[in-house]
Structures are given as structure tokens and as C-alpha cells.
Image (tube, rainbow, N blue to C red):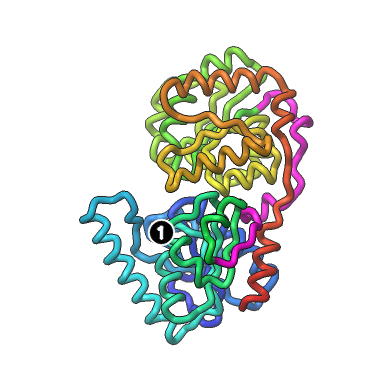
Amino acid sequence: MTIDPDFSNALVFTGGGTGGHYFPAVALGQGARVRWPDVPIVFVGATRGIEASKLPESQWPFRLLNVEGFLGRSPLRAARSLRLLWRAVSELKSRWKTQRPKAVIATGGYAAAPALFAARSLGIPYFLHESNAEPGWLIRLLAPRAVQVWCGMEAATARLPRAKCRVVGTPVREPFLREFRPLDSLKPPYRLLVLGGSGGARALNDALLALAPGLLDQFPDWEIVHQTGLRDFEELLKADQHARHHLRPFIEAVDMELEQASLVISRSGASTCAELKACGRPALLVPFPASAGDHQRLNARAMAMSGQGVVVEQGGGFANRLQTELVRLMADPEPRLGLAKPEPNRAVELCLWDLASGI
């Protein structure tokens, strides 16, 4: 682990803030390390993102920059965020004038902005991956000059008319590039896995805390494993829980938990959707209502149209509607099996093929 790395002739992977941006960058970095073992790989992220806790635990050389998101903030906070971004870009430009990277590969989020603006300014080739159906502002702004824009969904290409786009899906980490145990081979106790994203989801936490006792009494051959997020974990522990309702602040080996799950409740970030597809697990998808460009709702609808998920929107009566779907799917294995459609994920392979020809 190096926190002040040498960028000379390196592939720089950047993307973060949330797991949905960070984990695809890791997946691409893992693939690049296998394909080009002699090429240096460096990660660039933000001090406030999920990467700030994950990169120090990893083997990757990395640099964390003091930047923050500015969309949806007050004018004063937005101005502060822009000043931080300018300083971070200046820092990278100064470094890269003497330690020039081979290319920058970005998977979105505000954490990717400094490296991308520095690369564009210095004429360093850069590649973009947009997981969602609705591209973020950074991707829309920089896509026209990217060597290649990889899209997780076909819908994104229409929103990037001046870019060189290719639909590849969303990269998943190495543990998801394998064959998963078939859903119909699972035995009791059947597991309901609740994933609110890397930061948790208060609406899901509140609903599950209320619904779990009745569901687990009604279905004695089921248990619940519930990722709450660090923010809510200690508070939820103080509440009464059913003996088969297991709370965890964060699940590291999520592929192993998904393999044991007979049903999943989840937000619908693009990375999560890609992982659900890779392991072929039926899901109740609850889009985050405030996601940028409403991308989580578009992702969830795409999953529903392909018969790989059921959308349950937040809002009035959310807990009752969630309970109705849970009872339906927990009571009968047939509709769960109908949603279990594993898809091999080739996104890393396809992206690295383009990267090899573009640098």
C-alpha cells in the first residue's frame, strides 16, 4: 500500500464516493492487473468516499484527494466544493507533468472529477464507464473527448450522442466471475438478504425492523440477514429483534451472502443490479428516490422488464406494499425461481479489450 504513489506510465483508476462507483473501478483494476502484470496501477479517490476506508485495506497504491460533491448543495457549499476541486486538479496536474500516467479510467462519481479534468488538460487519454441508464453530469461533460465510453445499459447511449459508446454491462469484482449455486438447491433455513447499499438505507431499515417479527413468525423456515449500514447499526441494535433477524453494519463478502440467499431486498444501484444478475438471485428492488437523474428507478425498471426483479417504490404505504411482495415470494418458490436468471458478466473483458487498443 502506497499513499503517495509514482504515477509514471501507470493506469490510473478513479471513481468513488459510493460503492456503486468504487467497486466497478476495483473490478477493472483487478482485470488489468491480471492482463498486464508489469504495468503500474494506481487508484485516485476522495477522502470522504467509501474508497477512503477501502483503499488503505487493499494492495493498491492510491492517492486520496480532498474533494466533495456539489450537486444539490447551497450556493456557498457549492462554491467551496468547486474550490476544493480546483486545488485537487492543480495538485494532479503538477504531479503528472513529471509523472505522466499511461491513461485514466474513470467509473464516475465526484471522486473521479480531479483525475479526469487533469487528464483532459494534459492530453492524457481517458476512458469512461457509465453504469446507469441516466449518465451523471461528469460523464456527460467529458464523454465527447473520451477515447471510449463504456455503458452499462443501452439507454445511456442515447444520452451521449457525441461520444464513442459501447454497451458492455457493469464490471463486477472477481468473486462474481464464477458459477453460483443454483437457487433451487438451497435448503431451509431460507435466507432473506437485505442490502441498503454501502451506506445503508433508513427506509429499508425502518420497514424491516417493523415487518421482520411477523414475517419470521409466519415463515419459520426463513431467516433474515440485514446489512444496516454503519450509520444506523448501533441504534437498531437497541431495538427488539426476532431471534432469526441478524443485523450487520456492512457485509464484506457479499458474493457469499448472495449465494446463500433465496430472496434479496436491495436498492437498485447499477453495481448491485449487475451483481444480482451475475449470481441469479431474485430481488425486490427499492429505488432510492433522490438518486441523480432518477437513475435507480430506471435501473430497477430495466431489471423488472428483463424478468429479474420486482420494483417496490418508496412513498405512501411502502411497508405494506413491501410486506405483500415478501409474503408472496417467501410463501412460494415458483415465483422466486422465475426471477432467477443468471447472466455471465463480460464487462471487464470487453473494457480491457478496448483499453488495450486505445493506449
Indicate whether 95 appears above or below 89.
below
Q: Can residue 259 be seen here? A: yes
Q: What x and y, as percent, mark residue 235?
A: 37, 31
Q: Which residue is mark 1?
A: 110
Which residue range is magenta in the image? 163-190
**How dense is the environment of label 1, judged by Cα within 10 Å: few (below 14), some, or many (20 and up)?**
many
- Magenta includes 178? yes
Q: What x and y, as percent, mark residue 226?
A: 53, 32
Name the residue: 77% across, 30% down.
Answer: 184
| Along the line of sight, the residue nearer the viewer: 180 or 273 | 273
Q: Main SS of the magenta segment?
A: loop
- Magenta includes 39? no
| Along the line of sight, the residue nearer the viewer: 302 or 108 | 302
Name the residue: 67% across, 74% down.
Answer: 356
Residue closest to the far left: 76
Q: What x and y, as percent, mark residue 100?
A: 49, 83
Helix, strand or loop at label 1? It is helix
Q: Can residue 56 be seen here? A: no
